[in-house]
Image (spheres, rainbow, N blue to C red):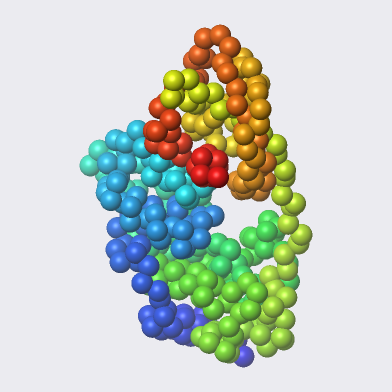
Amino acid sequence: MTLPPAALRRLLLAWYRGHARPLPWRSDADPYRVWVAETMLQQTTISAARSRYEAFLRRFPSVRALARARSDQVLRAWTGLGYYARARNLHAAARRVARRRGEGFPRDLQSWLALPGVGRYTAAAVCSIAFGRPHAVLDGNVARVLCRLFALRRDPRRAAARRRLAELAQALLDPRRPGDWNQALMELGEVVCTPKRPGCPACPLRGSCSARRRGIQALLPALGRRAAPLGLRWTCLWIERRGRVLLWKRGQDEFLLKGHWGLPEAGRLAALVAEPLKTIRHSITRYRIELELRRASLRGPKPRQARWVKRSRLRESLVSSLWLKLLDD
Ligand code: SF4
């Protein structure tokens, strides 16, 4: 029997009150804290975000502090979280918010959507949690729970299925407690209605779940085949002179690690390339990179995009875990 939305809300919110994990971003519904957390949580696991969140807020305790920071400081504070475009967008958006003299944070969905890097998910999460606005979130956890609850057999990554799920999420949203409702549904997907083995006996919605009733919960959501990872081969150069190593600033038009300092790729500058030093393998988003490091010497003057950095201070300039892995191995 499928219960009406009001009954489902009561069940799930009661469960959430008793089972919500004490995550650091749940202690305060301040919009800046919620925004930072929701940005970190996109494409990053809770355990990885948890360890970086408090450190990031200590470093940039307010939107003004973040707006005043240099971009390399923000990227460094983002180390370990990956997907650095999120940090660059957060920084750019913080500067816009800080310029709204006296107005503080936007409070409506459209104004949040107008900020760099803020998509429908983040805007709905911040508006509902920080300002109590009635906007449903739809992330992977919510999509999985809804696919099972309503036995939807369509691939939730397809646009039509996504639209249907967004309608269902909005129809179920508790208009009086939208922030708690959104978090409760995400929490259920994260800890009970998990991808491989949903814990149906412990689920507060089990009595209304169509997939469970039909015994097909493990088959949903019906995800099509994922795109295969793309392999890349990079050759990077270790150019060292009198204890200093040449670093290269990657351009904004690169498709990976835009604007990062890193070791120069072969072919980007005039160099005499010598013996290989090591090879590492590393994944960034869906790219599997095989990076060969070769000793080299610079020919001609130092290019504008390059700078010498003391070998002992390399880690202060290199942010991506790709370079840190290269130094460690
Ligand atoms: S009953 Fe099982 S499949 Fe259905 S929503 Fe709950 S955990 Fe997910």
- Establish if 315 lies above or below 36: above
Can residue 251 be seen at all in this image of the molecule? no
Q: Quadrant of residue 73?
A: top left
| 153 to the left or right of 44 | right
| 128 to the left or right of 159 | left
> Where is the N terminus found, in terms of image quarters?
bottom right
Can residue 64 be seen at all in this image of the molecule? yes
The residue nearer to you, when weighing 67 against 249, is 249
Taking the spot 61% from the left edge, 17% from the top edge, the residue there is 271
- Establish if 69 lies above or below 301: below
Counting from the top left corner in percent of width and height, residue 57 is at 31, 51
Taking the spot 48% from the left edge, 20% from the top edge, the residue there is 241
| 107 to the left or right of 269 | left
- Establish if 49 lies above or below 168: above
Counting from the top left corner in percent of width and height, residue 189 is at 54, 72
| 320 to the left or right of 284 | left
> Where is the C terminus found, in terms of image quarters?
top right
Taking the spot 67% from the left edge, 63% from the top edge, the residue there is 156
Counting from the top left corner in percent of width and height, residue 282 is at 62, 46
